[in-house]
Image (cartoon, helix red, strand yellow):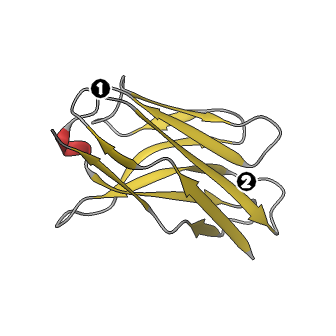
Amino acid sequence: QVQLVESGGGLVQPGGSLRLSCAASGSISSFNVMGWYRQAPGKERELVASITRGGRNNYGDSVKGRFTISRVNAKIAVSMEMNSLKPEDTAVYYCFIEGLGGRDWWGQGTQVTVSS
């Protein structure tokens, strides 16, 4: 069993910044890819950012240049810095991890609200 623990969501004003963190624990020693999706009310879940075991990043078009995902050294964990936040970034953000065998696990989600 694998657990993902997310932290860092909250309320921020437009133009502000937040950092999300996600750490995996349990029966996992490495991964293929790890990152974040988000889902806003009435919308489909969309990729925000991901990073491979080798360090290759991938970003959704709407966050390129504003969000940065990085691995936490020596841990199965990622951190995502979100800058220049916009009201349209408001969503529940879900951490995910794909293990070496191709199975994926998801976190419970953390709310990010961008509002004045």
Q: Nearer the viewer, residue 57 or 86?
A: 86
- The residue furthest bottom is 1
Residue 19's x, y, as percent? 48, 37
What label does residue 92 carry, if any? Answer: none
Is residue 81 toward the left or the right of residue 114 in the image? right
Q: Which residue is label 2 attached to?
A: 31
> Amino acid type of disc 2?
Phe
The residue located at (36%, 26%) in the rendering is: 66
Give above or below for 111 relative to 48.
Answer: below
The residue located at (20%, 62%) in the rendering is: 43
Residue 98's x, y, as percent? 64, 60
Badge 1 marks a residue whose secondary structure is loop
Q: Which residue is label 1 attached to?
A: 84
> Amino acid type of disc 1?
Ser
Give above or below for 21 relative to 93.
Answer: above
Residue 112's x, y, as percent? 34, 50
The residue located at (67%, 33%) in the rendering is: 55
Q: Quadrant of residue 78?
A: top right
Mark 1 or mark 2, which is nearer the start of the sequence? 2
Q: Quadrant of the C terminus?
A: top left
Residue 65's x, y, as percent? 36, 22
